Image (cartoon, rainbow, N blue to C red):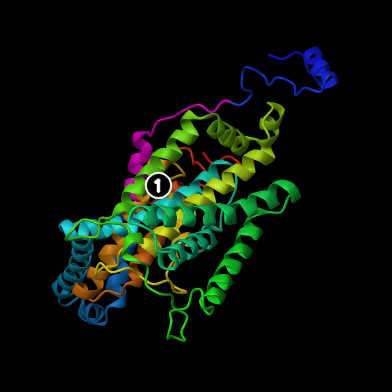
Amino acid sequence: MTTPEAMDAARVDGRSPEPARRPLIRQPRRGISWEEVLTTIGAFVLAFFVGAVLMIVSDTEVRSKYSYFFSRPSDALIASWEKVSSAYGALIKGALGGYEAITETTAQAAPLICAGLGVGLAFRAGLFNIGAQGQAIMGAMLAAWVGFGLHLPPGIHLLVAILAGIVGGGIWGGIVGWLKAKTGAHEVIVTIMMNYIAAGLLAFVLTTTAFQRPGRTDPISPVVDWNATMPRLEGGRLHLGFILALAAAVAVWWLLDRSTTGFAIRAVGASPHAAATAGMSVARTTMITMVLAGALAGLAGVQAALAPSVSGTPVPLSAGLVGSIGFDAITVALLGRSKPFGIVLAGLLFGGLHAGGLAMQSVAQTPLTLTTVLQALIVLFVAAPALVTTVIPFVKARKVRPVGPAAGGALT
């Protein structure tokens, strides 16, 4: 432990004082308890139960059978069962029913995992990164431009396009981190504004000659060169992007749990004042965190721009290419409790809901928007364990843990 006398001597000599050898912040590791597992399962059960009720209420034919429920209850019950079972059966089949369905789930999950990691990493530092959408847009824009604007040899072309998207997202996130660290600007406001700027910038560049497809007047870019698209396996949509998403999750886990920078991120998230007292630079950690978070969200945009479509052909850059990946990533990070492994599972879950929602719409004539409702219900119940234990009493109540940055900045 550095003594006050040694610190004073260091200041006189112009040297920075040696930080304390024993960290002032300790974050005990805790495993997942069975109570948490049961509560999470209960949250899923409640979400799908509410979803079933919505299906029954919204279906005119099924609802009409309840008009004579007391005279012939079997008609209403059978119709309700057929409606719910066919819808959820189609959902499961569309997400997991065979090789093509599983690879579609992985394709949908890959950008959600990357962007979710960006949001979750910022959460661990006590930062609300609401700007994953803008960071993903910048990543997609730069990756697509390299994809159709440059003509490089195979392999190198894809690598340069991926790096361009990661750098674009990292710069967009780094601007937020710099403003937060140097001026004290609130990251929520700044990231929201940066989302608007990124969307407006994309809309503008699509009207320029550098991005607009020759011979077209609508805002759409040329098709990305085949050399710059992510390779995929035949017969499905399992492509390199999913492997990159898993590699990014492993890298974030190593960063947070095995590196000095990760310890600083967790320490600043737990208590910025205590971290500063321990000799850590809160401003530097904030900027590093936002650069890394933006790079991860930029990788999600790269996947939107360079991943092959259902038909296997590249997708041109357009205003709606990124969709709502950045906003969905917030839900993924919250559901995964900002842990890399949890984010991967949450991303796969939401990817399966996206993939199965199309089958549910075509097979069971259930609105596609119901999958969005299911996602919201799952997050609602997972984020409110006290509500789950109240509705399902046999699930033992556990201590409520926050799913976002706490008052002190920590995400537990």
Q: Please state if 141 lies on the left or on the right of 42 as rendered.
A: right
Looking at the image, which is closer to me, 130 or 318? 318
Q: Which x, y percent locates residue 222?
A: 40, 74
Vertical relation: 268 (above or below) 291: above
Q: Quadrant of residue 131?
A: bottom right
Q: Is residue 197 visible?
A: yes
Q: Can residue 49 be seen in this view?
A: no
Q: Residue at x 36, y 71 (%)?
A: 369
Q: Does the magenta-highlighted stretch encompass residue 39?
A: yes
Vertical relation: 179 (above or below) 125: below
Q: Which x, y percent locates residue 89?
A: 18, 63
Q: Which x, y percent locates residue 285?
A: 63, 39
Which residue is under mark 1? Answer: 343
Q: Does the magenta-highlighted stretch encompass residue 97?
A: no
Looking at the image, which is closer to me, 294 or 42? 294
Q: Please state if 209 lies on the left or on the right of 88 as rendered.
A: right
Q: Which residue is drawn at 19% across and 66% down?
A: 90
Looking at the image, which is closer to me, 23 or 220? 220
Q: Please state if 287 lies on the left or on the right of 85 as rendered.
A: right
Q: In which quarter of the image is residue 364?
A: bottom left
Looking at the image, which is closer to me, 3 or 313? 313
Vertical relation: 87 (above or below) 11: below
Q: Residue at x 37, y 33 (%)?
A: 33
Residue type pointed to by label 1: Ile
Provide the secondary structure element on which disc 1 rests.
Answer: helix
Task: Write the start and end of the magenta stretch as one range.
Answer: 26-43
Q: Which x, y percent locates residue 264?
A: 59, 33
Residues packed near mark 1 inside 10 Å, few (<14), some (14 to 19) or many (20 plus): many
Vertical relation: 226 (above or below) 4: below
